C-alpha cells in the first residue's frame, strides 16, 4: 500500500507509489497515470505548505543541514525567484492566468499524444506544480515558499514543492523533445 497513516503522521512509501503509477491496469485510460501524477503533485505541494504555515511564523528559519539547507516561511507575490514581486499586485492575476493557460495547453497536448511518455510525465508535473501555486494565489494572494538552500554568503531563492515539480517537469519535457528530435532525424 503506497500510503499509510501511523502514529507519527502520514507516510508515503515512494517505491510503492511509483510502482502503482507504472502498473496501472491497461483497461484504465492510458492517460490516467498522468492525471494521478498531477494530482499527487498538487496534494504533496498543498500538504507541505499547510505543514509549514501551521508550524512557522513569517520569516522564521529552522536549520536542517548546517550551512546548506533551512526550512523557512516566506511569501512570494511574483514568479520564480520573486520575478515581478514588487509590481503592485497586477502580477498576481497575470501569473494566475498564465499558469492556467499553460496547464490547459499541456492537458490538451497530453490528450492529443503530442508528447511521448517522458514528455507526458513532465507535462503532468508542470500541471501539478502550476496548479499548486495557483491554489496559493487564489487562497493567500501569494505563493508560499519554504525550502531555502545556501552556501556561505550565497543564497538560492526560497522555493516550494510545486516549483520543484515545475522545474523537473520542464527538464523531462525538454529531454523528451531532444530524444524525439533525434528519432525523427533517423527516419
Image: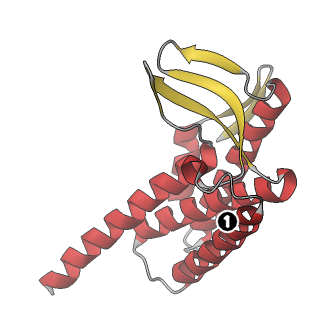
Element under disc 1: helix
Determine the image quadrant of residue 157.
top right
Label 1 crowd (10 A; few <14 / some 14-19 / many >=20):
some
Query: How many numbered marks appear?
Result: 1
Q: Position of residue 90 (x, y in %)?
A: 75, 66
- How are the colours assigned in the image? secondary structure
Residue occupying the point 64% across, 25% down: 71
> Which residue, given by chain and number where applicable, does mark 1 sit on?
95
Q: Position of residue 118 (x, y in %)?
A: 40, 65
Residue occupying the point 50% across, 12% down: 66
Q: Residue furthest top?
A: 66
Q: Position of residue 64 (x, y in %)?
A: 58, 17
In the displayed structure, does residue 91 sit left or right of residue 186?
Answer: right
Q: Position of residue 25 (x, y in %)?
A: 58, 66
| Nearer to the camera, 113 or 169 | 169
| Nearer to the camera, 131 or 143 | 143
| Nearer to the camera, 144 or 19 | 144
Residue occupying the point 55% across, 74% down: 30
The answer, for residue 186, to whether it is visible in the render is yes
Split into 4 quadrants, where in the image is the N terminus?
Answer: top right
Q: Residue furthest left?
A: 186
In the displayed structure, does residue 14 sit left or right of residue 96?
Answer: left
Residue occupying the point 33% across, 72% down: 177
In the displayed structure, does residue 176 sit left or right of residue 86?
Answer: left
Query: Is 26 drawn above or below residue 134 in the view shown?
Result: below
Split into 4 quadrants, where in the image is the C terminus?
Answer: bottom left
Determine the image quadrant of residue 60.
top right
Amino acid at each position: 500500500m503506497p500510503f499509510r497513516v501511523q502514529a507519527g503522521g502520514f507516510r508515503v512509501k515512494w517505491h510503492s507509489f511509483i510502482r502503482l503509477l507504472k502498473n496501472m491496469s491497461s483497461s484504465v485510460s492510458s492517460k490516467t497515470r498522468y492525471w494521478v501524477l498531477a494530482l499527487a503533485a498538487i496534494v504533496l505541494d498543498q500538504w507541505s505548505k499547510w505543514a509549514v504555515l501551521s508550524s512557522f511564523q513569517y520569516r522564521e528559519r529552522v536549520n536542517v543541514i548546517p550551512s546548506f539547507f533551512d526550512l523557512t516561511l516566506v511569501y512570494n507575490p511574483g514568479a520564480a525567484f520573486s520575478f515581478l514581486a514588487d509590481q503592485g499586485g497586477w502580477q498576481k492575476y497575470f501569473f494566475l492566468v498564465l499558469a492556467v493557460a499553460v496547464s490547459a495547453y499541456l492537458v490538451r497536448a497530453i490528450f492529443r499524444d503530442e508528447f511521448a511518455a517522458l514528455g507526458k510525465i513532465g507535462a503532468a508535473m508542470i500541471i501539478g506544480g502550476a496548479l499548486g501555486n495557483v491554489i496559493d494565489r487564489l487562497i493567500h494572494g501569494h505563493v508560499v515558499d519554504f525550502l531555502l538552500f545556501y552556501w556561505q554568503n550565497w543564497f538560492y531563492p526560497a522555493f516550494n514543492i510545486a516549483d520543484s515539480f515545475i522545474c523537473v517537469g520542464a527538464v523531462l519535457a525538454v529531454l523528451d523533445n531532444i530524444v524525439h528530435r533525434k528519432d525523427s532525424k533517423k527516419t
